[in-house]
Image (cartoon, rainbow, N blue to C red):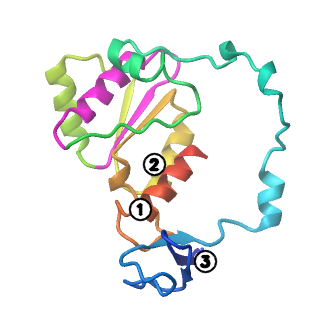
Amino acid sequence: MAKVKTSFVCQQCGSVSPAYMGKCPGCGSWNSMIETIDERRSAAHSRATRPVERPQLLGSLEASSLARIPVPISELDRVLGGGLVPGTLVLIGGDPGIGKSTLVLQAAAALANGKQPVLYVSAEESVQQIGLRAERLRIPTDNILVLSGTDLDGILATATSVAPSLLIVDSIQTVSVDDISSAAGSVSQVRECTSRLMQ
């Protein structure tokens, strides 16, 4: 597979460079050049695969048409505005050790149902560590699938084959795509990984 073409774009002025530069040649700001992918696919392929969207009157939309999935953790449910909206991406942030992984594991257990499993991907811990946490918390793990990995394309392939009701990636700053040469956790990697997860 051919390597995807990338360039470096200044986040201050938009100046473009084919290689990384510590100082932007356009505005002179330091460390503002971020690697971005120039083309994902040809324009013809993009048009052929993209569904045609029709505009809708804002007043004709009903709030009830956005069926939220309630989260049986009251405070998390409140923060999410009454539950998760299918097809959305939620980023949970906080200081290290504050309990983000514990919270999402509890949410995974609460949302796992008999029809579709929840896929919990850990790019920071082994599946054994996740198992120990689940045992310590005494949460039911019958319908939670766990995967340890950092390659986003592999994670997405697994998610496609499993078709989970919920996909959890812990954490976005430790996964990466091969198309971008910068390290996992860089702005360009996080932006591209997030974009692919949304798609």
For badge 2, the amino acid type reads: Ile
Tag in front: 2 or 1: 1
**What is the crowding at mark 1: few (fewer than 14 residues within 10 Å), some, or many (at least 20)?**
some
Residue beneath the point at 48% across and 68% down: 11
Residue indicated by mark 2: 155
Residue indicated by mark 3: 2
Instruction: Report the magenta residues as a range.
Output: 96-123
Residue indicated by mark 1: 187
Total number of numbered labels?
A: 3
Distance from disc 1 to disc 3, alpha carbons, whole Å, reads 23 Å
Q: Which mark is residue 107?
A: none
Mark toward the start of the polypeptide (1 vs 3):
3
Residue 105 in sight: yes
Residue situated in front as seen by the camera: 19 or 132: 19
Q: Find residue 173 and report its horizontal and vertical position in percent.
A: 34, 53
Q: Find residue 59 and report its horizontal and vertical position in percent.
A: 79, 21
For badge 1, the amino acid type reads: Val
Mark toward the start of the polypeptide (2 vs 3):
3
**What is the crowding at mark 3: few (fewer than 14 residues within 10 Å), some, or many (at least 20)?**
few
Provide the secondary structure element on which disc 1 rests: helix
Which residue appears farthest toward the front when viewing the image?
Answer: 27
Residue situated in front as seen by the camera: 183 or 129: 183
Is the N terminus in the top left, top right, bottom left or bottom right quadrant?
Answer: bottom right
Q: Find residue 186 and report its horizontal and vertical position in percent.
A: 37, 64
